[in-house]
Image (spheres, grey):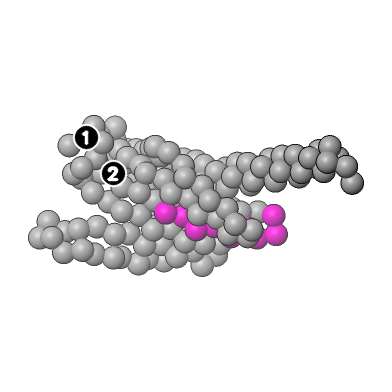
């Protein structure tokens, strides 16, 4: 094989790998976007379309007394809260950035956010999503978030 042909194949291979990775990142991001589209609309069916049946859900926060808390919940509790949200409540979780990492069938997404309730700032934090590629469809298998009212960019 000549050096020119070798370089051609190497460039072709590397380009294909880069585009494949970008495509998977876009699919993972679309999964997160679909989850939040359902969240904002109150559409639990749309949310469930990108969730595994037994998705693990956790939240971390520090109490006013300074105690660190980890709360684990069934995803059904979140679905119930969304389905039963009244029309006078506007929940607006604004994702600030996406840090997406993919390795084969697993993906991780780190999304700092601000949460607004009825157009007033409530809290901020970070979501950490774990996803699994279920036969070509990215599904959320785990979500943990942090919540705080202080040290939020441009808020307190």
Mark 1 / mark 2, whichever is N-terminal: 2
Dot 1 falls on a residue whose secondary structure is loop
Q: Which residue is mark 2?
A: 124
The picture quadrant where one finds residue 7 is top right
Q: Which residues are magenta?
A: 128-136
Q: Is residue 137 left or right of residue 90?
A: right
Question: Residue 152 location, x and y as percent?
Answer: 24, 40
Q: Is residue 120 left or right of residue 85?
A: left
* Disc on res. 155: 1
Where is the C terminus found, in terms of image quarters?
top left
Q: Nearer the viewer, residue 25 or 155?
A: 25
Question: Is residue 145 visible in the rendered structure shown here?
Answer: yes
Question: Residue 11 location, x and y as percent?
Answer: 75, 39
* Main secondary structure type of the part rendered in magenta: strand
Classify 146 as above or below 38.
below
Question: Residue 50 location, x and y as percent?
Answer: 57, 53
Q: Is residue 130 magenta?
A: yes
Dot 2 falls on a residue whose secondary structure is strand
Question: Are the residues tagged 1 and 2 within 8 Å (C-beta)?
Answer: yes
Q: Nearer the viewer, residue 134 or 83?
A: 134
Q: Is residue 117 left or right of residue 10?
A: left
Q: Residue lying farthest left? A: 65
User: Quick one: label 1, few (<14), some, or many (20+) residues within 10 Å?
Assistant: few
User: Quick one: label 2, few (<14), some, or many (20+) residues within 10 Å?
Assistant: many
């Amino acid at each position: 094989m000549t050096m020119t042909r070798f370089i051609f194949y190497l460039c072709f291979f590397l380009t294909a790998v880069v585009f494949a990775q970008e495509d998977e990142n876009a699919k993972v991001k679309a999964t997160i976007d679909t989850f939040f589209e359902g969240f904002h609309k109150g559409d639990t069916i749309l949310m469930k379309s990108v969730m595994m049946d037994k998705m693990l859900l956790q939240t971390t926060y520090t109490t006013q007394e300074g105690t660190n808390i980890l709360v684990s919940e069934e995803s059904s509790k979140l679905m119930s809260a969304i389905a039963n949200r009244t029309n006078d409540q506007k929940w607006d979780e604004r994702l600030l950035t996406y840090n997406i990492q993919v390795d084969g069938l697993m993906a991780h997404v780190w999304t700092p956010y601000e949460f607004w309730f009825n157009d007033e700032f409530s809290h901020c934090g970070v979501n950490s999503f774990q996803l699994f590629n279920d036969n070509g469809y990215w599904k959320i298998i785990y979500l943990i978030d942090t919540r705080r009212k202080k040290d939020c960019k441009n808020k307190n």
